[in-house]
Image (cartoon, helix red, strand yellow):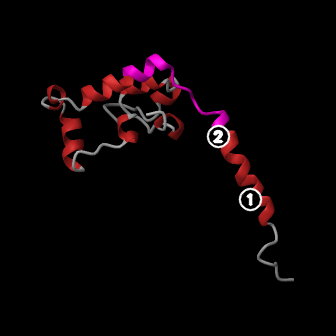
């Protein structure tokens, strides 16, 4: 028998409809006082005073016409702390030397 194109679709659609609800329930929340600290920290990262001595940020800004992704910013230790990224996730990707930290889960990046 040849399967009709619509067979099985309701199961897939209903499973997909449930996924966002589950993801939303597990999403981290940002404390109000953390939000103002995050804004201040991001302003600092892009300040003239910081860009004159922070080669990593300067390179990031120069590479993409001044744009730095939220994913990149969320890898910075100070922002990881302010976002409340669990310590075990913050430590992933660290080996010997100065390996960059692992990407932060998307649910934390969206908080930015």
Q: Which class describes the residues within 10 Å of circle 1: few (<14), some (14-19), or many (20+)?
A: few
| Residue position marked by numbered label 1 in the rendering | 13
Q: Residue at x 79, y 73 (%)?
A: 6
Image side of residue 75 versus residue 15, left or right:
left
Residue matched to label 2: 23
In the orientation shown, which residue stands out farthest toward the right? 1
Q: State the image coordinates of residue 71 (x, y, percent, origin top left).
A: 40, 41
Q: Mark 2: which secondary structure?
A: helix
Where residue 78 appears, as percent x and y from the top left, is: 36, 23
Q: Cα distance, mark 1 to mark 2?
A: 16 Å
Quarter holding residue 75: top left
Q: Quick check: 32 above or below 4?
A: above
Q: Which residues are magenta?
A: 23-37
Q: Between disc 1 and disc 2, whose residue precedes?
A: 1
Question: Of all residues shown, which one is farthest toward the bottom?
Answer: 1
Image height check: is 81 above or below 26?
A: above
Is residue 62 inside the magenta stretch? Answer: no
Image quarter of residue 5: bottom right
Q: Position of residue 63 (x, y in %)?
A: 22, 49
Residue 10 against residue 19 in the figure, above or below? below
Q: Secondary structure at mark 1?
A: helix
Tell me: 60 left or right of 78: left
Q: Label the magenta part by its dominant secondary structure.
A: helix
Taking depth in this image into account, of 92 and 43 the one nearest to the observer is: 43
Name the spot of residue 108 as percent of width and height, x first. 50, 34
Identity of the residue drawn at 42% across and 27% down: 80
Quick check: marks 1 and 2 in contact, CB under 8 Å? no
Image quadrant containing the C terminus: top left
């Amino acid at each position: 028998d040849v399967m009709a194109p619509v067979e099985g679709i309701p199961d897939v659609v209903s499973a997909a409809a449930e996924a966002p609800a589950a993801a939303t329930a597990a999403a981290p929340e940002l404390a109000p006082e953390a939000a103002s600290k995050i804004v201040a920290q991001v302003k600092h990262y892009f300040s003239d005073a910081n860009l004159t001595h922070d080669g990593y940020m300067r390179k990031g800004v120069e590479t993409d016409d001044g744009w730095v992704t939220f994913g990149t910013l969320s890898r910075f230790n100070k922002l990881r702390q302010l976002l409340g990224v669990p310590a075990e996730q913050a430590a992933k990707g660290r080996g010997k030397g100065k390996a960059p930290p692992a990407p932060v889960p998307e649910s934390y990046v969206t908080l930015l």
